[in-house]
Amino acid sequence: MANWDRSLAFGTGFGAIEALVLGLVSLLGTAALLLLHDFLPPETQARVAAQLAGRAAFLPLILPVLERAVTLIIHVFSCVAIIYGFRTRRALPWFALAFAYKSAVDGMAAWGIQVLKARESITGLTQLELLMVPFAIAGLAGLVFLRKRMEIMDVSLCHSNLPTN
């Protein structure tokens, strides 16, 4: 049976696999940028140099870590909510909550890419990542709520399986 620990592990594994895949893609992109720098158009070279020399030169290093941490929390909460729904035999409402939550996150990401130009500037990317933090905070609150509920369920299940005299 999927208890709190197993549910948390499943959600963490789901988020970690995505982080690993996207991290490798990002690493390959960065390596290509560094190795092929001399072959880039001059305007691209100038933009990269300006981003790395600016006051916020540390942001390209910190933002991916923030993004992965936020995304991991979002994945874990969504997975745990779905598992909790199955355990309580109320899968549909909990699935709907997880689906709506992740859809709101994806919608915010799409909006940020279009409106904030998150793919084109460090400022836009920073703004988008900061907009995702409240989703992670909500996910953490949801995890605290679900942990309490699942641990109560586990204790109740344990007591119901005790032999009676």
Image (tube, grey):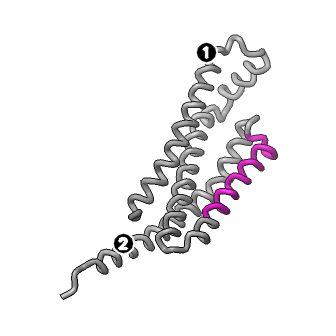
The span picked out in magenta is 98-118
Majority secondary structure in the magenta region: helix
Q: Which residue is mark 1?
A: 35
- Check disc 2: other Cα within 10 Å, few if <14, some if 14-19, many if 20+: some
Instruction: Decide whether residue 14 is among the magenta residues.
Output: no
Residue drawn at (58%, 37%) of the image: 22
How dense is the environment of label 1, judged by Cα within 10 Å: few (below 14), some, or many (20 and up)?
few
Q: Which residue is mark 2?
A: 154
**Callout in the foreground (2, 1):** 2
Residue 18 is situated, as x and y percent measured from the top left of the image, at 55, 42
Q: Earlier in the sequence, mark 2 or mark 1?
A: 1
Distance (Cα) linking label 2 and label 1: 54 Å
The N terminus, quarter of image: bottom left
112 or 52, nearer to the observer = 112
Q: Is residue 127 above or below residue 58?
A: below
In the rendered structure, the answer to whether residue 94 lies left or right of residue 156 reads right
Q: Position of residue 45 (x, y in %)?
A: 73, 18
How far across and how far down the image is residue 107, in percent? 73, 53
How many marks do you count on the picture? 2
Query: Is disc 2 in contact with disc 1, using a CB cutoff of under 8 Å?
Result: no
Q: Residue furthest top?
A: 38
| Residue 101 placement, left or right of 91 | right
The amino acid type found where label 2 is placed reads Asp
Q: Helix, strand or loop at disc 2? A: helix
Query: Residue at 64% of width from left, 57% of height from top?
Result: 102
Tag on residue 139?
A: none
Image x and y of residue 109, in percent = 71, 49
* Residue projecting furthest to the bottom: 165
Q: Quadrant of residue 44?
A: top right
Task: Name the residue: 59% across, 39% down.
Answer: 64
Please tell me which residue is depicted at 55% across the width and 36% down the height of the picture: 21
